[in-house]
Amino acid sequence: MVKDRLGNEIPSSGTPTGLLSFLYRTFPGRIFLRLIRARWVSVLVGAYMDSSLSRGHAKKALRKNAVDMTGVAQTAFDSYNALFTRTRETSLFPFSADERDFCSPADSKLTVLPIDGGTVMHIKQAPYTVRELLREDTDRFDGGYAFVFRLSVEDYHRYAFPDGGRLLTHKFIKGTFHTVNPIALEELPVFHRNCREVSMLETEHFGTVAYIEVGAMLVGRICNHRKTAFVRGEEKGYFAYGGSTVVILTEQGAVTPDADLLQNSSHGIETYVRTGETVGKKA
């Protein structure tokens, strides 16, 4: 279930499809899934989505899906990826000028989870520890929070830095591209099968944070701008074709999440947030 900040339920766009039911719940589907998870398939699909051959898919998406076109001046797109990676007027989504505000980096469905080094977090309904997510033996985020921003196909797929600062380290973790649709999550632990980029950031007001972009099946590219220094609200990158996820981990005593987000998350409810919207406070 997804709710807005006023407590209203938002219809889910993640309804299981017949294709995904076939892929994950039948033996022939599992065999086919093993084939399409290959990296070369993602590359091929990405090339198609970049080409003018996919123009019809873009028109269909605009016609049939609730694609968020707020602040987008363009009305026609030469390819599906041109629609998917569209840009918009950023002034419509300003980040709070209050340096104590911790802001959402993306339009997304948000879950906030307390981090306990001895427990397992359920991210996207899949059991996952911080160490598995980062592929790193660390306890630096114990006592902090995991902010999980799930982007659906209709969302704006560019994401930003929540605060100013500098890049400490960056690494790419190979993985099998996999769907983040709930059907898959019922069958397989997903995140550790996905490729992801992990950036350790030293922020001006919230200490060290881990910023992780997670790719989904048939998302051939996590497109990050290589910045060693950045300012609050500056674009960090974008996802090409497919639904994807941003995870931000904060250290103990750095951020106090907003109470409604913690309340919703404790009941398994995601909260829809917009880019630049305050989701916590400097502790």
Image: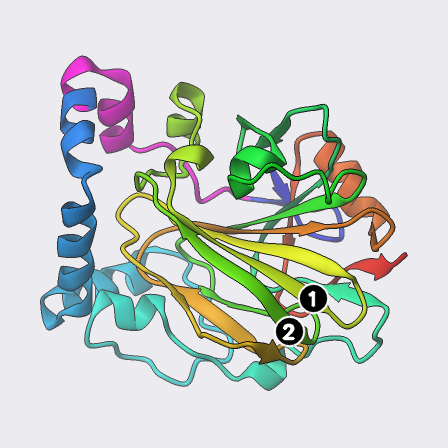
Q: Amino acid at mark 1?
A: Glu
- Residue 253's x, y, as percent? 87, 50
The quarter holding residue 222 reads bottom left
Q: Which residue is at 85% across, 46% downward?
A: 259
Q: Which residue is at 51% across, 39% downward?
A: 135
Q: Which residues are magenta?
A: 11-29
Whichever of labels 2 and 1 marks the residue nearer the N terminus, that label is 2
252 left or right of 167?
Answer: right
134 left or right of 4?
Answer: left
Q: Amino acid at mark 2?
A: Arg
Mark drawn on residue 166: 2
Residue most toward the top? 27
Residue 107 or residue 171, whichever sits in front: 171
Q: Mark 2: which secondary structure?
A: strand
The quarter holding residue 177 reads top left
Total labels: the figure holds 2
Q: Is disc 2 in contact with disc 1, using a CB cutoff of under 8 Å?
A: yes
* Residue 152 at least partly seen: no
Residue most toward the left? 53
Question: On the image, numbered disc 1 is attached to which residue?
Answer: 202
Mark drawn on residue 40: none
- Residue 28's x, y, as percent? 13, 18
Q: Quadrant of the C terminus?
A: bottom right
Q: Is residue 20 magenta?
A: yes
Q: Which residue is at 44% across, 31% downward?
A: 182
Q: Is residue 114 magenta?
A: no
259 left or right of 185?
Answer: right
- CA gap, disc 2 to disc 1? 5 Å
- Residue 230's x, y, as percent? 61, 79
